[in-house]
Structure formats: C-alpha cells, structure tokens
Image: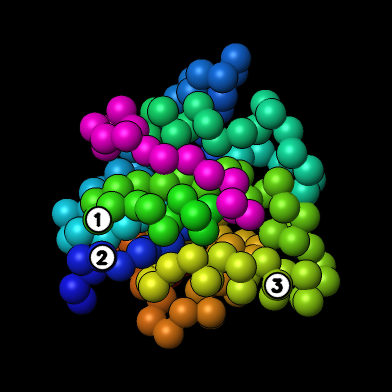
C-alpha cells in the first residue's frame, strides 16, 4: 500500500521498567523499532499506542510513557511527539509525513479494560477516528482490551507488524507435544 500521507496506528508493547523517569531496560522498545521505521520510510504518519503498568484507569505520573518517548526517539534517531488521547487529534493534524507521535498510556483510560461493552466501543471509536490504518505489533500483550481487540475490528484491513510476524514464525517452529 502507498502509505505516503496516511496515518497509521501502531499498537506495540512498550511496557518497560521505568525508575525515576528513566527507562531501565529498553529491549521491548528496540523490538518496536523495525515496524515503526518501516512505516516512516513509507512516508506514513505513525501514531504509537502502548500501555505501561496497571494504573487502574487513572492517571499515575509514575506510569507515564513520557520517559519511553525519549528512549524511542533515541532508538529511531528522530523526535517523537507526545499527546494524551483526548487531545491527540490536533497533534495528528499537524504531523508531517514520516513523523511519530506516542500517545500517553491508554491504561489511564478506564474504558481501555472496561467490562462494559458500550464504554469500550466509545473509546475504540475515538481511537479509530485518528488513523487510516491499524497495525498490531503487540503479540506479547494480546489480551482482551479496547486497543488490541475491538480497535483492530474497527479497521477494514488491520495488519500485524514485523515483530508479531517474527514471533509467529518462531512459534510455528515448535512441534506439537
């Protein structure tokens, strides 16, 4: 697909240890880089969605993805913008092709893991309106939540990222017991 000028939501696993606003281990962030770089090379505007810790649907400064933003920027060798979901539309409108925006921890929103279908649906609609395409690159964190299950269903052609493809390839090498 021609992704020039298109906005792509990438759900990935950036749930890394953070202490005193410093990333302690960037392994998972490194794993996210190939998919993001590929999309940037295609001229996409990349909006990254991730989770950190278990804030229980409330803002918790110690679980902010802000330190992750800076580490991701170092690894991508580019500036990574940052926004909270409710205010992200304006940030995305002003993104240039080949730019990255990291959304604040989606677990700060109680709708993300709500047991009420209507709450999750509203949150999914809000996220889906932000982009043209959806990429799931968060195989390790795939569990029922708005951003990994329902959000994929909101797009016509959701795809998996390079990390998920790699993990599926490795798992397929296992023999049945």
Q: Is residue 85 magenta?
A: yes
Q: Residues within 10 Å of mark 3 (few under 14, many from 20)?
A: few
* Residue at figure coordinates x 32%, y 57% from the top left: 45
Q: Quadrant of the N terminus?
A: bottom left
For label 2, count other residues whose C-alpha is less than 10 Å away and answer few (under 14), some (14-19) or many (20+).
Answer: some
Mark 1 surroundings within 10 Å by alpha-carbon count, few (fewer than 14), some (14 through 19), many (20 or more)? some
The residue at the point 53 percent across, 44 percent down is 83
Give yes or no for contact between labels 1 and 2 (Cβ–Cβ under 8 Å): yes
Q: In the rendered view, would you say 138 is above or below 153?
A: above
Q: Front-most of 52 and 174?
A: 52
Per the image, the residue denoted by label 3 is: 122
Q: Picture coordinates of residue 21 (x, y %)?
A: 56, 19
**Left or right placement of residue 113 versus residue 48 in this view:** right
How far, Cα to Cα, is label 2 from label 3?
Answer: 26 Å
Does residue 142 show up magenta in the picture? no
Q: Secondary structure at mark 3?
A: helix
Q: Is residue 138 above or below residue 84?
A: below
Q: Give yes or no for contact between labels 2 and 3 (Cβ–Cβ under 8 Å).
A: no
Span colored in magenta = 73-87
Task: Report the colour scheme.
Answer: rainbow
Q: Position of residue 129 (x, y in %)?
A: 52, 71
Residue 30 location (% of width, % of height): 33, 37
Which numbered marker is on residue 170? Answer: none
Give the numbered dot on residue 5: 2
Q: Which of the labelled discs sits on residue 97, or is there none?
A: 1
Disc 2, SS: loop
Q: Of label 1 and label 2, which has the lower sequence position?
A: 2
Q: Position of residue 18 (x, y in %)?
A: 56, 24
Mark in front: 1 vs 3: 1
């Amino acid at each position: 697909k021609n992704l020039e000028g298109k906005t792509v939501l990438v759900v990935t696993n950036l749930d890394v240890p953070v202490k005193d606003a410093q990333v302690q281990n960037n392994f998972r962030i490194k794993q996210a880089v190939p998919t993001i770089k590929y999309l940037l090379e295609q001229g996409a505007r990349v909006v990254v969605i991730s989770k950190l810790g278990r804030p229980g649907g409330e803002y918790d400064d110690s679980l902010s993805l802000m330190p992750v933003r800076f580490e991701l920027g170092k690894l991508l060798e580019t500036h990574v913008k940052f926004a909270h979901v409710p205010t992200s539309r304006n940030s995305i409108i002003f993104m240039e092709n080949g730019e990255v925006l990291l959304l604040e921890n989606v677990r700060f929103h109680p709708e993300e893991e709500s047991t009420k279908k209507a709450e999750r649906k509203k949150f999914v609609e809000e996220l889906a309106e932000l982009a043209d395409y959806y990429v799931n690159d968060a195989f390790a964190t795939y569990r029922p939540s708005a951003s990994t299950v329902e959000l994929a269903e909101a797009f016509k052609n959701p795809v998996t990222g390079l990390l998920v493809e790699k993990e599926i390839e490795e798992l397929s090498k296992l023999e049945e017991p």
